[in-house]
């Protein structure tokens, strides 16, 4: 059985070092038109593979000693009336940098910056969870994503 506290600690580091890090992270575009971000630390390895654009969808997988131990899938979008996505996704990246170590699914329960507010509601623990995140601009929803995940391949 995987050490859940170690997994949570690794997920925080991996997520802060990949998409949340912004343009400084190396992105690999695959033949299938997906984008993959990776992070390695000791025996741990993290892959974030997504499609899109608007809307977008993807999955995160964590490997321990080359064995898959965790997966999270997600799907989200910026509302159609928003033509410039940059500010919305900068807010998302800011929220993802504030990922809580005890619930490392996405960002914190709430974060406000300027005209933007990020909200994240979730249920469950690292072994089986689901949630939904929103970004509001001046009180109006401009972004939404749903996610779910947990441990995989834990019983032999």
Image (cartoon, grey):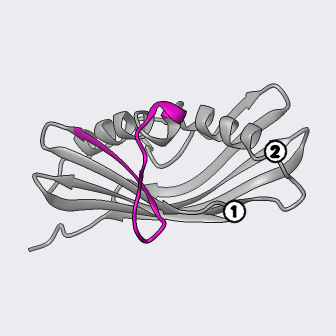
25 or 9: nearer the viewer? 25
Residue 13 image offset from top left, x and y in percent: 35, 33
Instruction: Report, in whole angstroms, how far the alpha carbon at label 1 lies from the one at label 2.
Output: 17 Å
Tag 1–tag 2 contact (CB < 8 Å): no
> Which residue is found at the position 67% from the left and 65% from the top?
55
**Quadrant of the rendering where the C terminus is positioned:** bottom left
Q: Is residue 31 magenta?
A: yes
Q: Nearer the viewer, residue 61 or 133?
A: 61
| Residue lying at the far front of the rendered structure | 31
Please give the range of residues in magenta: 21-40
Q: Give the x, y percent position of residue 152.
A: 26, 67
Above or below — where is 21 with respect to 155? above
- Above or below, 115 relative to 146: above
Q: Nearer the viewer, residue 24 or 111?
A: 24
Residue at screen point 80% across, 35% down? 116
The residue indicated by pointer 1 is 54
The residue sitting at 55% across, 38% down in the picture is: 96
Left or right of 152, for residue 55: right
Disc number at residue 69?
Answer: none
Provide residue 24's location: percent of width, then percent of height: 47, 30
Q: Secondary structure at mark 1?
A: loop
Task: Please indicate whether residue 102 sits to the left or right of residue 130 in the image.
Answer: left
Q: Residues within 10 Å of mark 1 (few under 14, many from 20)?
A: few
Q: Quadrant of the N terminus?
A: bottom left
Q: Which residue in the rendered view is the most extreme toward the top?
A: 114
Is label 2 in a helix, a strand or a loop? strand
In x, y percent, where is residue 94?
61, 31
Residue 65 horizontal side relative to residue 55, left or right: left
Would residue 84 appear left or right of 91 to someone viewing this image?
A: right
User: Dot 2: few (<14), some (14–19), or many (≥20) neighbours within 10 Å?
Assistant: some
The mark that comes first in sequence, 1 or 2, is 1
Task: Say the numbered circle drawn on residue 136.
Answer: 2
């Amino acid at each position: 059985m995987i050490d859940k506290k170690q997994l949570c600690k690794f997920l925080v580091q991996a997520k802060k070092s990949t998409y949340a890090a912004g343009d400084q992270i190396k992105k690999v575009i695959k033949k299938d038109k997906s984008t993959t971000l990776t992070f390695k630390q000791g025996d741990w390895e993290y892959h974030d593979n997504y499609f899109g654009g608007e809307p977008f969808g993807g999955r995160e997988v964590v490997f321990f000693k080359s064995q898959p131990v965790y997966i999270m899938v997600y799907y989200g979008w910026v509302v159609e009336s928003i033509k410039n996505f940059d500010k919305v996704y900068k807010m998302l990246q800011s929220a993802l940098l504030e990922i809580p170590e005890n619930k490392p699914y996405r960002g914190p329960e709430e974060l406000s910056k300027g005209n933007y507010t990020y909200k994240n509601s979730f249920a469950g623990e690292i072994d089986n969870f689901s949630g939904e995140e929103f970004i509001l601009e001046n009180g109006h929803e401009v972004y939404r994503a749903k996610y779910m995940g947990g441990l995989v391949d834990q019983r032999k």
